[in-house]
Amino acid sequence: MNELLANGPGLGAWLSLAGLLFCIGTYGLLTRKNLVAVLCSLELMANAVNINLVAFSRFHGDELGQVFALFSIALTVAEVAVGLAIIILVYRQRQGIEIHELTDLRG
Amino acid sequence: MNATALAVLVYPLLSFLLLGLVWPLRQNGRLAGWISTLAAVASFLGSLRLLWKVLEGEGVGSATIPWLVADGKVIAELGIHVDGISASMLVVVTLVAACVQAYSLGYLADEPKADLGRYFTWHSLFIVAMGGLVLAPNLLQLFLAWELVGLCSYLLIGFYWRKPSAGRAAVKAFWVTKFADMGLLLGLIVLYATTGSFEWSTPVPAAWAVVVPALLFVGVMGKSAQVPLHIWLPDAMEGPTPVSALLHAATMVAAGVFLIVRAYPLFEAAPPLLLAMTWIGAVTALVAAVTAVVQDDIKKVLAYSTCSQLGFMIAALGSGQLMGGYFHLTTHAFFKALLFLGAGAAIHATHSNSIHQMGGLWRSTRFSAVLFIVGAAALAGIPGLAGFFSKDLILEELLHAGQYGPLAMLLLSAGLTAFYMTRVVAIAFFGPASEGAAHAHESPPSMLLPMTVLMVPAVLAGLAGPLFAGLWNQPYHFALTPVGGLATLAALSGIGLGVLRYGTRSWASPLPEGPRRFILSAPIDSFWLAAWQRGLQPVARGIGWVDRYVVDGLMNAVGWLFLLAGEKVRALQTGRAQDYVLGVLMGVLAVVAYGLVGAA
Amino acid sequence: MAAWIAFFALAVVLVGAAVMVVSARDLVHTVLWLALGLVTTAGVHVALAADFLAAVQILLYSGGVVTLMLFAVMLTRHLEGATARMRSESGARGVVVALMLAGLIGASLWRSDKLGAKAPAMEVDTAALGELFLGPLVLPFELLSVLLLAAMIGAIVLSRPEGPPGSVPRLPPRVTPPGGPHE
């Protein structure tokens, strides 16, 4: 136990934190109604993934994990840019960005 | 040889295509009639030339092209088969057809132009079909042509399509013959299954030797109006009289007889069937002759007379003697066509079919009356005329075959034939003067000329006996045998009875009221009607019920199941993005959970 | 020991911010809480010895993304109102799915035997990353720039107002939804 304390938080600790974040993000993704809030929840989940990547990189001693995280961040930024543009478009056409009102895919 | 034979078919085929495709020509009616008639005449001249060549021993044989080739094996062939039988039959068909078409130009002159154009179009098609039947090299082509002439028959019986009775008669003829053709078709199928070809010369294995010709004979009974499948022929008289002359007296109904002559190798192998044929033919001859005695409609008399004479032919073929049956076929074609055309002239003059409305026609239309009486005498078997020789030959052949029962029935029929023809002539031409006959005029030359042409073979065809014997390679020498004497006696006594009966100027029915009523009520028709209503319809209704509620029900249930499932599954597609995300997540969870469990 | 204190501090702030992101009633608050979470994540990166990544995180995420989102909120809030409704019929569903996910993640972590590994003494410095990007990974790196360019053009095309270029974009008409103003 002392050894664990002395060594500081290990891989499991960081992964647990990321997993918790990911779950919270999932909850938001499923329950938020505003499109911007849904996008925020997605960001949380992407962040959790990034933490995982960095943690693995640190504990495996491989810088490629960081490289992956960088790519991931860049992709997320692109996603947000396009996503927000879509939200504005939806708003312009529908006068609202309530996700529950977008039911064109209904069978 | 092939060119000559093909030419016989090509002229009417061209005429049919021309009239069928170029509708202004068809709408013109009269012009269409001329085209069709000229094609028929050309066809007749061609077939005369063909017969001449054949008699000189030239060009006998067949030429075929393969049809329906499968796996490199020729299943069926189309083509022409020329020999004495087909060449002489072609002459009969085309001569009668040409005369009838020319006659129609006058007889149907008052019909609407479009109807007339259609009429001649079907006539051209009929000559093509009948020629194809006569020249058929195998049973399959014969069957095709057989159905084609059946179609022409249906179309031409229904010529007066504004009359409901004509439509009904056309449908009745179609269905009765089609019912019989089922037998023919089955026979063809069995023939092909057992011998692997549609040739009539291939012997059928012994187990099927009776079945195949028996099935073919069912088709013959329908087409050649043998009892009990003769019921369509009297109704077919609803068609125009020239049609009755060509199709329902001279040529088409004789197709059945022709089929037996052609496929005789098959029939020969089935002696029980031959015996049955003899009896069926004799019964038909007698029943139809009795029925003809009480008819008042001149065309009905002739129709039953046709049935009766076809019975003579079938009986002759059944006794194993082809020549007599075939000889009678040709002579009958001439004098019966002449009779029908003469009856048509009387109908044209009086606008009625009833012989009681024609009384006294002798005075106003003497020329056509003479022609009719000549035809009647030929039919009755007056010595020297065509019918005498061929009927005599049939009776002699029956005697040789030892068929005394049918022989007696045929002798009786011959007497009855003479009697009912005398009755018709007496009432229609010499009976009490009727209103119709008072205003009657002689027919136009376009009708009288073809009748005169037909009268020549009706009188002289009997002398062609040696010619026919040559076709069969049989000796022929005419001698008035005791049977011939009996037949002549029967004919003369029939005529004598008629003269005695009507010479007294008493025009009442020859039979007592009871039997007359019974015969006129058409008991065989009633039998078929009852068989249809009580036998076939309930079965059909039962099958219909099974189809509607069991088979369709099953299909509907399956369809309904999928509809229901679709409705239920549809609810999953809410259109809300988050529901889809939920689905994706559930899938991911399932995969990960499976991986965890699998790793354990 | 100090490392543990830092971890728990970061974890508490991060989880707290995340919970607020998914539960705040006010949309602006949501975005602001997200900004806090992203900055804290940068802290996590520092704790994991990824300094350059932390810098990128703050620059891109906290600076760019959050600003963009605030813009989007500003552009749409005059109709929507400032609030994003939290209560919904799918709340229970979200909880269930999140718990199942947590259970699976927990189970897989529990079964792993490599979690206690001590971090090697390796320090990843920025220079090494730079050499990676411009060395063996130059092709994906350049492709990434193409992707970003495409995303930028796409965003512009999507959100550009209709009408000829240069015309003043009309504000969309203010329409009251059938159910009346939201909450």
Image (tube, coloured by chain):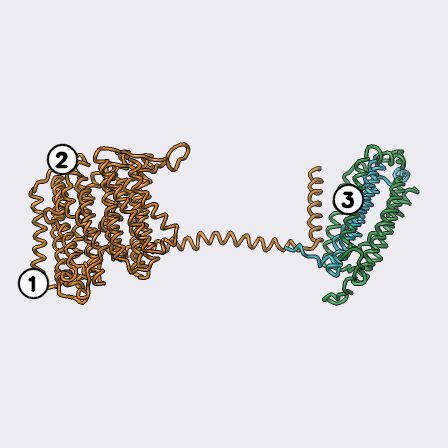
Chain colours: A cyan, B orange, C green
Q: Position of residue B118 (x, y in %)?
A: 34, 54
Relative height, residue B571 to residue C52 (above, below): below
Report the quarter where the N terminus of chain A lies. Answer: top right
Total numbered badges shown on the rendered structure: 3
Crowdedness of circle 3 by 10 Å Cα count: few (<14), some, many (20+)? some
Near-viewer residue (C71 or A54): C71
- Dot 2 lies on which element? loop
**Alpha carbons under labels 2 and 3: distance apart:** 115 Å
In the drawing, what numbered circle is on residue C106? 3
Crowdedness of circle 2 by 10 Å Cα count: few (<14), some, many (20+)? few
Amino acid type shown at disc 2 = Pro
**Circle 1 is placed at which residue position?**
B504
Pointers 1 and 3 in contact (C-beta within 8 Å): no
Report in which chain the residue with disc 2 lies. Answer: B
- Dot 3 lies on which element? helix
Near-viewer residue (B263 or B250): B250
Amino acid type shown at disc 3 = Gly
Amino acid type shown at disc 1 = Thr
Q: Image quadrant of residue C22?
A: bottom right
**Circle 2 is placed at which residue position?**
B475
Q: Is residue B318 left or right of residue B500?
A: right
